Image (tube, rainbow, N blue to C red):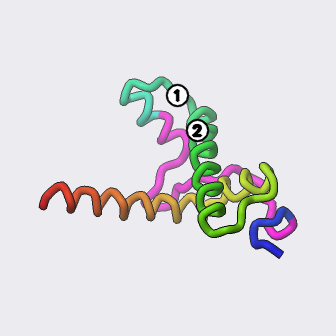
Amino acid sequence: MSILEEDDIDEQKEYATVADEEGDNYRDIADMMTMMGFEMNHSSARNYLIRVMKKFAETFSERLGSPMKSEAVMYRIAKDPGFQSSVSELLHIVELDRRREECR
């Protein structure tokens, strides 16, 4: 049985957001995007974030050799705060590596 099967994923009751001491919530993200010239409200920020997280989840599962069985599973993984936090950490590491390479 795959770890990505629908029955193995706990249903989230509320929207996830990487908003601990270091993160931002959807309203903060929308405000930042609006200040940068991309008019956005919190629900649009959530929708964009979930869409991108679904792409990460799909890519990770394919690369691990266990493609997701359903859109519902992909959506639940994308909403998971732990998954969002992990992707955020990975992106941070990639950006630090990129900057180090530029300085060489």
Percent coordinates x, y for residue 33 in the rendering: 43, 33
Q: Amino acid at mark 1?
A: Met
Residue 48 is tagged as 2
Q: Quadrant of the N terminus?
A: bottom right
Circles 2 and 1: CB atoms closer than 8 Å:
yes
Residue 40 is tagged as 1
Q: Earlier in the sequence, mark 2 or mark 1?
A: 1
Give the spatial CA distance, label 2 vs label 1: 10 Å
Magenta stretch: helix, strand or loop mostly? loop
Question: Where does the magenta region start and end?
Answer: 7-30
Count neighbours of disc 2 (C-alpha within 10 A) and say few if under 14, some if 14 to 19, many if 20 or more: few
Q: Could you tell me which residue is drawn at 66 percent across and 59 percent down?
A: 80
Residue mark closest to the camera, 2 vs 1: 2
Q: Is residue 104 above or below residue 31?
A: below
Q: Amino acid at mark 2?
A: Tyr
**Quadrant of residue 97 within the rendered picture:** bottom left
Q: Secondary structure at mark 2?
A: helix
Q: Could you tell me which residue is drawn at 42 percent across and 58 percent down?
A: 91
Left/right of residue 37 with respect to residue 39 in the rendered view: left
Along the viewing direction, whichever of 98 and 34 lies nearer the viewer:
98
